Amino acid sequence: PLPVLAVVGRPNVGKSTLVNRILGRREAVVQDVPGVTRDRVSYPAEWAGRRFTLVDTGGWEHDAAGLHARVADQAEVAIELADAVMFIVDATVGPTSTDEQVVRLLRKSGKPVVLVANKVDSPMQEADASALWSLGLGQPWPVSALHGRGSGDLLDAAMAIL
Ligand code: GDP
Ligand code: MG
């Protein structure tokens, strides 16, 4: 069986956009607002001659009261089934309490993690990425899933832990 790389993060951080970037095609559904509940979706993927299974975690119902619980449920299952995790944070927002909740799950799992600082669309936003060192997951990789900026270095880092 191929190694499994799961893409985890709260709604709207750009998980599906990054999955499409990695796949090189628009297969994962990108939404401007979180809202539609979907299960985890697995895709066959390849980088630098390595094949792996890429798992996008779907949206959650945008129910303020239940949001944390839903993020935790989805993330926990995806982390459990993965060999390694890409944890995505929206660098333009910075770490939220929901992000911190996922960090606790990641720590508990002991799974290897690469931290993605997404929506770093320009060099001027690199400082936003640096703020994510505070999550204690090591180096944040600055990426623009939308434009492709930094995605090659990120994938190299992911392959190194997968
Ligand atoms: P998901 O809910 O985590 O899967 O997030 P999506 O991939 O559906 O993206 C949510 C929104 O963020 C969409 O409007 C995307 O176009 C936007 N987005 C995703 N990645 C980037 C990025 O690198 N830069 C910018 N500016 N917007 C992004
Ligand atoms: Mg999505």
Image: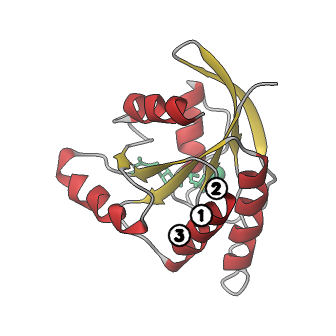
Q: In x, y percent, where is residue 69?
A: 73, 77
Which comes before the other along the chain, label 2 or label 3?
3
Q: Are marks 2 and 3 in contact (CB under 8 Å)?
A: no
Q: In x, y percent, where is residue 127?
A: 21, 58
For mark 3, what is the residue? 99
Instruction: Tell me the CA gap for discs 2 and 3.
Output: 17 Å
| Amino acid residing under circle 3 | Asp
Q: From this view, report whether residue 52 is shown above or below residue 71.
A: above
Tell me which residue sits at (60%, 27%) in the image.
23
Q: In x, y percent, where is residue 106?
A: 61, 61
Instruction: Tell me the CA gap for discs 1 and 2.
Output: 5 Å
Q: From this view, report whether residue 131 is shown above or below residue 24.
A: below
* Ligand 1 neighbours mark 1 (CB distance < 8 Å): no
The outermost residue toward the top is 49
Quarter in which the N terminus is drawn: top right
Tell me which residue sits at (34%, 46%) in the image.
142
For mark 2, what is the residue? 110
| Amino acid residing under circle 2 | Gly
Q: Judge from the rendering whether residue 121 lies leftward or rightward of residue 160; answer left or right.
A: left
Q: Are marks 1 and 2 in contact (CB under 8 Å)?
A: yes
Q: Are marks 3 and 1 in contact (CB under 8 Å)?
A: no
The numbered disc on residue 12 is none
For mark 1, what is the residue? 107
Closest to the camera, between mark 3 and mark 1, is 1
